[in-house]
Image: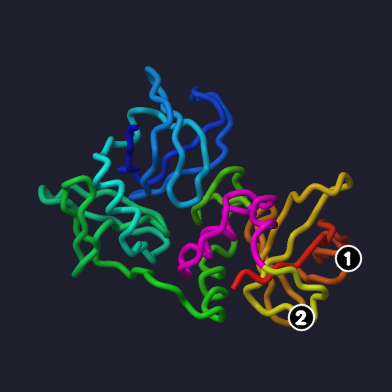
Amino acid sequence: MLFGICNLSIVPIRAEPSEKSEMISQLLFGEHFTIIEKQKNYSKVKGFFDSYVGFIDNKQFEEIAEDLYERLSTSEPVFSGEIIDFITNSTNDYFTIPLGSRLPFFLKNEFILNSKKYIYDGKVFSGKLQKTEIIQNAFKFLNSPYLWGGKTPFGIDCSGFTQMVYKLSGYSLFRDAKQQANQGEVLSFIEESEPGDLAFFDNENGEIIHVGIILKEYHIIHAFGKVRIDTLDHSGIFNAELQKHTHKLRVIKKMI
């Protein structure tokens, strides 16, 4: 079994082993994974954080030893808390990292990635936050453009948005909306929900296709064109700009 870690800011995870293939998700700096199959140019990987499977370019990660993978898997994660910031290494090279990058074994503004020491002076997130603080993290992504497979403030999809907000708050969600809909506790009515709960929406075939984070006073923040705030009612999401409902409500879930 082989293992790897993302040593670049943002690496695309693709559906097939080709740069022309659809991007289905992303790895952020510091995320580690299992290498299921290593081919000539691409590797099929399974992320530790959400068990998501896809292909990444062999030039865009470093292999790590199994014992390091295990230590990363059992250590308390620390994530970068700035929209974008940079890190420096021992030779003063600097690299940009986006919000939610993992800083392995972070201590006193230093961390180690595969035996290389880096310095990071920005804000960090670690441990579980209170439910009320989840909304503050959601607002960090406000107006981020929609990007299928994206997970950063520079491009994000609906389930990537909810996953990253919960990740920064110390909780794990699966990658896709339909997977996230299988987590948590079902609530019967919007009135039972609290800010930070998730609302899921389906299509005409009953398939979960969208998710957002409930705010107070019947509002929701979600990624649709961009990360935006709209009204939530018993029918679904009402977009005031379009003067119509854009998504049909299926279920509300309490995750924490």
Q: Looking at this view, is 134 or 179 the one in front?
A: 179
Name the residue at 30% across, 49% down.
70
In the rendered structure, the answer to whether residue 223 lies left or right of residue 247 reads left
Quarter holding residue 85? bottom left
Name the residue at 48% across, 62% down.
167
Quadrant of the image containing the N terminus:
top left
Q: Looking at this view, is 239 or 195 the one in front?
A: 195
Give the alpha-carbon distance from disc 1 to disc 2, as whole Å: 16 Å
Quadrant of the image containing the C terminus:
bottom right
Does the magenta-highlighted stretch encompass residue 60?
no
Q: Position of residue 64 (x, y in %)?
A: 26, 39
Which residue is denoted by mark 1 in the rendering? 235
Q: Amino acid at mark 1?
A: Ser
Which span is picked out in magenta?
158-184
Which residue is denoted by mark 2 in the rendering? 192
Q: Looking at this view, is 155 or 159 the one in front?
A: 159
Q: Amino acid at mark 2?
A: Glu
In the rendered structure, the answer to whether residue 47 lies left or right of residue 150 reads left
Does the magenta-highlighted stretch encompass residue 181?
yes
Instruction: Tell me if residue 152 comes above or below residue 252 in the rendering.
Output: above
Q: Secondary structure at mark 2?
A: helix
